[in-house]
Image (cartoon, helix red, strand yellow):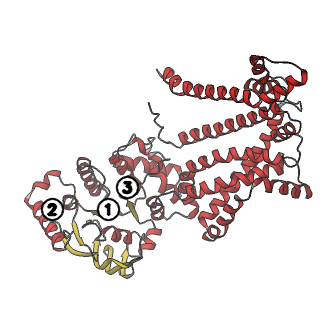
Amino acid sequence: MPASMNVIDIEALSLTFETGDGPVQALSNIDLKIAKGDFVSFIGPSGCGKTTLLRVIADLEQPTGGSISVNGTTPELARLDRAYGYVFQAPALYPWRTIARNVALPLEIMGLTRAQQDERIARNLALVNLTGFEKKYPWQLSGGMQQRASIARALAVEPDLLLMDEPFGALDEIVRDHLNEQLLQLWAKTKKTVVFVTHSIPEAVYLSTKIVVMSPRPGRIHDIVESDLPRGPRPLDIRETPEFLKLAQRVRDGLRAGHSYDD
Amino acid sequence: MTQPSFFRHSVVPVLTVIAVIVAFWYVAALFMNHSTVVAEAQLKGLAFTPSATWYRSWALDKPLLPAPHQVIAELWKSTAGLSVTSKRSLVYHGWVTLSATLLGFLLGTLLGILLAIGIVHQKVMDKSLMPWIIASQTVPILAVAPMLIVVLNAIGISGLLPKALISTYLSFFPVVVGMVKGLRSPETIHLDLMRTYNADDLQVFTKLRWPASVPYLFASLKVGIAISLIGAIVGELPTGAAAGLGARLLSGSYYGQTIQIWAALFAAAFLAGILVLVVGWSESLVMRLMGARPERRAA
């Protein structure tokens, strides 16, 4: 049994949507390997297929060609096995549930006992610094706190893999900086594999061990940039260092060469 | 602080509207009953002064349009003035109609919810049932009610149930329409979330679709309870029922008792208002228990 070292293994993957205006190639010839413990960002302009690729990994979209394995099995089996936690662009909290009950949602579905649920709720809310907000309803929390609650909900499943689709895209830059820093600490603490979709160059470079630069029409991988910044928690002012700026420059060049700035 | 603003924003406008309606009503009664008063005077060989004509047209036994104080006096006499078991008590008749209304409303709500659940989960039901459900409401209820009651009587079902079934026939419709919309109201992102948890259909229903549909349910229930009452009254008309607000309306019109008709009408309107209020109160209670953000009242 050849145990794959890679959490995600994608080869020659393509996805074509059938639309009213004829077929649209959303993903073309994607090759990508993501190793355990990596923090990988997909970056690119709108329409480059970065969210679609994440949804393929999550078995929310089906590819039309090529092969993909998640945790050494198909994305569908990985999903049925609840192998990943997914964080959406919006917090997607259920408004009729308190923060604690929102975090409990996947645990109820998994059939955990009340005691097991309570333990995981307390631990994961503590991880995202939301202890004390258990009984609040989503509307009583700020946007950043809501998104942190949704991260706690994804972590409560205790997956090894975290899929995040522009989770901080709707937040202001101050909150976003703060959450980026917290996310890196969390990642270092939990040793999870993270796949992160963003359209912000500083965010991608700051967070990632590997940056996948994508370009549109058809959606494809233009460049894969391995980061030489230290792994683990990074101070925010690492963004002023020459190493950081060099990486950011390479990502920007990649986006430009991929005709991302055409229109 | 809140007392005067409540007074200024709620009590004053309501009272103003009522005052205008009552004034208009008295004037209308004056004109409507004028010829009756003149005929009466001629019959008795009397000559009324204008002011006597006015007073007389607000005090006839069988006026075309009773004056407000006559209706209120009749309402008072037939509720507070009589034992509730009396056949002339509006409380007694109101209760007969109310029990049919509530039974029909309950059945209609259950039927509506079950149909909506089927329609949302089965494409076949959506395609096959929805046109019939809409068609059912295009048939005039006044035409259906006598047939339904005759048919049910023939198979030995009589009394409360036939009337309740007419209420059901009317009230299931807004519930189906509202609940189909409500059960389909969860956003894609909320449904995707359930998919990532590998949740089954029952879990998606109980944890997402059902709670998301609650506001839609209450909107439907408010319409449903009001037309349930209409259904129960309509159900009392064609059979010559001995009891109920509908029977009161009918006997009033047989004997030209216009004051009695108006009193029964007001009792029905009052009952409908109370029922809608009760549904509204349960709505705010349930929404508060579900953690809804309190509504801000405009200052």
| Residue at image mark 1 | A192
At mark 3, the secondary structure is: loop
**Residue under pointer 2:** A229
Residue drawn at x 47%, y 34% as measured from the top left: B297
Image quadrant of residue A188? bottom left
- Residue B216: x %, y % from top left: 57, 50
Of labels 1 and 2, earlier in sequence is: 1
Q: Nearer the viewer, residue A161 or B60?
A: B60
Mark 1 and mark 2: Cα distance apart in space:
18 Å
In the rendered view, tell whether residue B22 sits above or below residue B254.
above
Quote the CA–CA distance across marks 3 and 2: 30 Å
Quadrant of the frame with the N terminus of chain A: bottom left
Q: Earlier in the sequence, mark 3 or mark 1?
A: 3
Name the chain under label 3: A
- SS for callout 1: loop
Viewer-side label of 3, 1: 3
- Coordinates of residue A257 in the picture (x, y in percent): 15, 73
Amino acid at pointer 2: Leu
Which residue type does callout 1 highlight?
A: Lys
Q: Is residue B299 above or below residue A184?
A: above
Label of residue A90 in the image: 3
Question: Observer-nearest residue: A254 or A132?
Answer: A254
Under circle 2, the secondary element is: loop
State the separation of the CA atoms marked 3 and 1: 22 Å
Closer to the camera in the image, A224 or B1: B1
Q: Position of residue A175 (x, y in %)?
A: 26, 47
- The answer to whether B20 appears left or right of B4 in the picture is right
Q: Chain of mark 2?
A: A
Amino acid type, label 3:
Ala
Given this view, does label 3 or label 2 mark the residue nearer the observer?
A: 3
Question: In the rendered structure, are the residues bearing label 1 and label 2 in contact, judged by CB atoms less than 8 Å apart?
Answer: no
Task: Residue B54: give its label.
Answer: none
